[in-house]
Amino acid sequence: MSEAVLYDVQGPRARRRVLIGSIFGALFVGLLVLLAVRRLAANGQFAGELYEPFVSEPDLYRRLGTGLLNTLRAAGYALVLALLLGTLLAFGRLSSRAWLRAPAVAVIEFFRGVPLLLLILFFFLAFPLAFGIDLPPLYALVFGLTLYNGAVIAEIIRAGVLSLPKGQTEAAVAIGLRRGQTLRLVLLPQALRIMLPALVSQLVVLLKDTSLGFVIGFEELLRIGGQAVQVLDNPIQLYVLIALIYITLNVGLGRLAGYLEGRQRKTYGPDLPSQKVEESGLGQVSAAP
């Protein structure tokens, strides 16, 4: 039985070098952490009064909870809209009709190239001047996130579909399916398994990018944390707490993706990713005894 791998199996000397390098790397990182802790202690950053607000200010957690809910709401709206937009753009780019493919390519390349912050400022500042419609900060943030991430997701979907074996498309054509039906019914469900890690990574990026809402006054987690810092005067401690909240959310998303991927492996088997690696020519096949 053959198995696709992306690297050669390390020998004893290589494993020894990796182990030695890992030990020295861990010692170096530990030294940096020790120096940082000593520097913080010298500047009084471990004083009890800097941590007292986390116990004596219950309103702090209420405010941070409000910011967290606003962050999740903006990310949730943007995720749903970006997935819909990305799917439509990907289908347009994969279309055999030039009058559909050309506009889809133009839209994808344009919004991938425009900075996300510029899109958010456009919807918050320029859109009301151009169309006479004032958008709340939430809508301006969501629309900017949707356009940027929709363009990126469209490329993820296109790459996932194109990575499938050509026999899938040929089989669909053989039974009389049109191009749109082939994409929707045959290719996209299979490509989802390949796209899942990249989609989750993009969702993590989208969640973190909601912090750009502070420039337009949207009260997301980071903005509310900044307001609390001005009152409590403990920026390091409070921003570390906010960073831990973001890390917890992103780790949770990663675990959810791993769970979904495991469910798919149990249902459909692990063959498709291996086929993709073998057909791409990136892996080397090693025979197992």
Image (cartoon, helix red, strand yellow):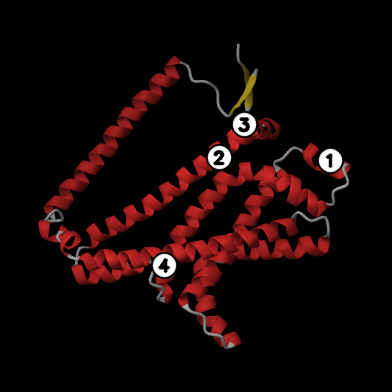
User: Residue tagged by mark 3?
Assistant: 270
Q: Residue furthest front?
A: 267
Sequence-wise, the earlier of marks 2 and 3 is 2
How far apart marks 3 and 4 lie (CA) works out to 38 Å
Q: Secondary structure at mark 1?
A: helix
Residue type for callout 4: Asn
How far apart marks 3 and 1 lie (CA) works out to 22 Å
Residue type for callout 1: Glu
* Closest to the observer, 53 or 132: 53
User: Residue tagged by mark 4?
Assistant: 70
Sequence-wise, the earlier of marks 4 and 2 is 4
Question: Can residue 39 be seen by looking at this rendering?
Answer: yes
Residue type for callout 3: Pro
User: Residue tagged by mark 1?
Assistant: 170
Q: x and y percent of residue 51 in the render?
A: 16, 58
Sequence-wise, the earlier of marks 4 and 1 is 4
Give the residue drawn at x 68%, y 42%.
190
* Closest to the observer, 232 or 271: 271
Give the residue drawn at x 39%, y 19%.
16
Q: x and y percent of residue 193 in the render?
A: 62, 42
Sequence-wise, the earlier of marks 1 and 2 is 1
Is 190 drawn above or below residue 245 in the view shown? Answer: above
Sequence-wise, the earlier of marks 3 and 1 is 1
Residue type for callout 2: Glu
How far apart marks 2 and 3 lie (CA) works out to 10 Å
Is 207 drawn above or below residue 7 in the view shown? Answer: below
User: Residue tagged by mark 2?
Assistant: 261
Sequence-wise, the earlier of marks 3 and 4 is 4
